[in-house]
Amino acid sequence: MGNQVNTGLAQLSDQLILATVLLYLAAMIGYALELAFGAPRRKANARQVRELVTVGAPADTGTGTDTGTGTDTGTDLQEGPAAAPWAPTAGRVAVALAWLGWAANLTGIATRGLAVGRWPWGNMYEFVVAICFAAVTTFLVLSLRQPIRFLGAFVTLTSALGLGFAVLYLHVQAGPVVPALSSYWLAIHVGAAITASGLFILAGVTGVLYLIRKPGAARLPEREDLERIVHRVIVIAFPIWSFAVIAGALWADRAWGRYWGWDPKEVWSFVTWLAYAAYLHSRATAGWRGKAGIIIQLVACGCLLFNLVGVNIFFSGLHSYADVSG
């Protein structure tokens, strides 16, 4: 691939990521305005949320018109304050801004890769940018068919903060990677880890919303529906993360001649896997549902975040090439 760096594309990538932060923040404001001033959610929406991530499941629209946006009208509205007439417009603008931010995020990743002639997740900065993109992608794709727009403010804010952290503290100049990363395994192993991480973060955001939700919050789903979203997203993400761990072991054998070496990144990847496995196992066998299960999955999400960022900052090892210093 060579070591030449297209500085023009690299600078364009940096500018696009900054634009993404602004667009996500603007979308967050729109989503928050709709959530705060829109109409209370229909009781029928609770039934629709139960169908989240069920392949091919049509939306249950109940007896009225429901777009899944939280701005419905009908006779089965939950009691709550009246909706502001401009709230639906704020929601539609938020969706448009979120998609614009998504496009800027994607283009920023693509131009970074083109600038250096490799897969654009060879260091911590690129990895975090890609994870934020995966989280927003998951939310936007699911929101096309499922009534989860209420998550928009929380997902876009989380992604904007993640990108801001990456820009301020993790950014390194575009350049070639160490020889160990010059492999097709970079696309397979790291790509799977990014996809799973984006899903886990979406579940984590929903879990936090579960804990802070107050009784009588007419514009949010019931806690059991939030818990159902968490569980079903993790059911999708867990096998992808499992594949990422296995692919990492295969890559390690090819690069270093062993499948497992107690490297800090390997250890914490496995700890993260165990934590999410504990959540799924406890929910399936011990019946740890509700708050207890949510806390377990948030602990697992904490392990994930520490594995993604903390390990590279506080530990040295064979994965030190992914440190903030590049």
Image (tube, rainbow, N blue to C red):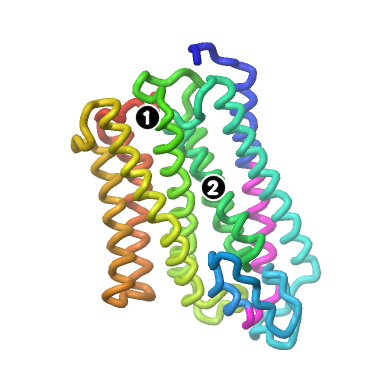
Mark 2 element type = helix
Residue lying at 43% horizontally and 37% vertically, measured from the top left: 188
Could you give the CA–CA distance between mark 1 and mark 2, rounded to whole angstroms? 20 Å
Q: How many marks?
A: 2
SS state under label 1? helix
Mark 1: amino acid: Ala
Q: Amino acid at mark 2?
A: Ser
In the image, is residue 133 above or below residue 119? below
Q: Is residue 308 above or below residue 177?
A: below
Mark carried by residue 159:
2
As drawn, the residue found furthest toward the bottom would be 75
| Residue depicted at 51% across the width and 24% down the height | 118
Residue 246 at x, y = what percent? 31, 43
Q: In this rendering, which labeled residue sits more in front, label 1 or label 2?
A: 1
Which one is nearer the viewer's eye here, 238 or 298? 238
Q: Can the viewer see residue 243?
A: yes
Q: In the image, is residue 40 part of the stretch drawn in magenta?
A: yes
* Between 194 and 157, the one nearer to me in the picture: 194
Circle 1 residues within 10 Å: few <14, some 14–19, many ≥20: many
**Location of residue 159 with respect to 204 vertically, above or below:** above
Residue 63 located within the stretch drawn in magenta = no
* Residue at the farthest right position: 85
The residue that appears at 61% across and 27% down in the rendered structure is 111
- Residue 56, x across and y down, in percent: 60, 66
Which residue does the image show at 58% across and 56% down from the upper left?
139
Asked whether, in this view, residue 290 is left or right of residue 160, the answer is left
Magenta-colored segment: predominant secondary structure: helix
Q: Residue beneath label 1, please?
A: 322
Crowdedness of circle 2 by 10 Å Cα count: few (<14), some, many (20+)?
many
The picture places residue 304, in percent across and down from the top left corner, at: 36, 49
Start and end of the magenta stretch?
Answer: 22-44
Where residue 239 appears, x then y in whole percent? 38, 54
